[in-house]
Amino acid sequence: MQIGIAGIGKMGAAIAQRLIEVGHKVTVWNRSAAKLKPVTDAGATGVASPLELAKNAEALITILSDAAAIDAVYHGASGLLAGDVRGKLFIEMSTVEPKTETALAVKVRGKGAALVECPVGGSTGPARQGKLIGLMGAEPADAERARPVLDQLCRRLEHCGPVGSGAVMKLTINMPLMIYWQALGEALALCRPLGLDPARIMELLSDTSGGPNVLKVRGPAVASMLKGGDSGPVTFNIDSAVKDLRIMLNEGRARGLDLPLVEKTLACYEEAREKVSGAAEVSAVSVHWATRAMP
């Protein structure tokens, strides 16, 4: 299949490389053209605009930073919808508010095309292996049309309901994880006076009922950072986590929900971003709070 991908950040690049490996012809566009090199080296074709990306693609995947980026890429003068896109399939994978996806779906359908939203759970490693968790929001016929491509990216693909449902479920699966990194930091601060080896603590925590799956993967890196070492590859950074937490709060307020843990976690992440770096791996939040001096 001819697939176009707009948004070649870490996840977009991993998705592009996966689709090339399973036999698709992939064309890519990114606002910063310098980021295209790893995927063009892997066999993708780079183009100069979203409009050009849409011309020959049967399906188009977008994975963008926020609602403003979606607006620019889809609706700009040289945007994806600037030309004739009748019959094309758009798969929108960004983490944004549900209302952003529902408004986009109306405009895409107005151009005679179909839109499936499918934000994903997982980082670049699972993306390269086709082991993401896909959270689809779509009309049933559109979901079935997108399934052959998404099945090659996802080990589990959930059709959550109409467009907007996938965005809600993405916030749902991210919320406990974002809160967990803060909770882990506070727990590590509590046991810090014991002087135990951080690797031993991580192994113990990952073997308990309170240890999430992510600790088995990221626990060694947290232990390394606690000992002054490196975090390893950054798969999801603090800036992205802050963005997601703000979206969660906005969506909660729109639904009349009080989310006190999210609100407090956001404040803690904002402090960590200021003291560490927004570009740091999100688990650095735990390390910051584990080693933070009392104010």
Image (spheres, grey):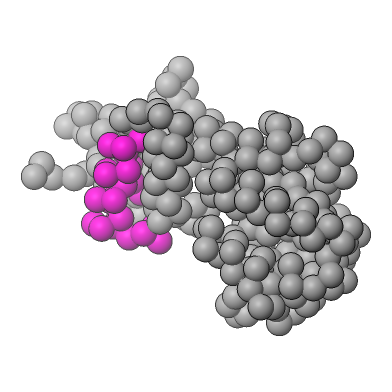
Examine the structure image and report whether residue 263 is included in the region drawn in magenta: yes
Magenta stretch, overall SS: helix
Q: Quadrant of residue 201?
A: top left
The answer to which of 233 and 127 lies nearer the viewer is: 127
Location of residue 150 in the rendering, given as x and y in whole percent from the top left corner: 79, 45
Identify the image quadrant of the N terminus: bottom right
Q: Residue at x 66, y 54 (%)?
A: 104
Identify the image quadrant of the C terminus: top left
Location of residue 52 in the rendering, given as x and y in whole percent from the top left corner: 78, 77
Location of residue 185 in the rendering, given as x and y in whole percent from the top left corner: 30, 37
User: Can residue 153 be seen here?
Assistant: no
**Where does the magenta region start and end?**
262-286
User: Can residue 187 be seen here?
Assistant: yes
Q: Is residue 163 left or right of residue 249?
A: right
Q: Where is 183 relative to 132, above or below?
A: above
The answer to which of 13 and 67 lies nearer the viewer is: 67
Q: Residue at x 30, y 55 (%)?
A: 273
Q: Where is 174 relative to 88, above or below?
A: above
Q: Is residue 17 left or right of residue 253?
A: right
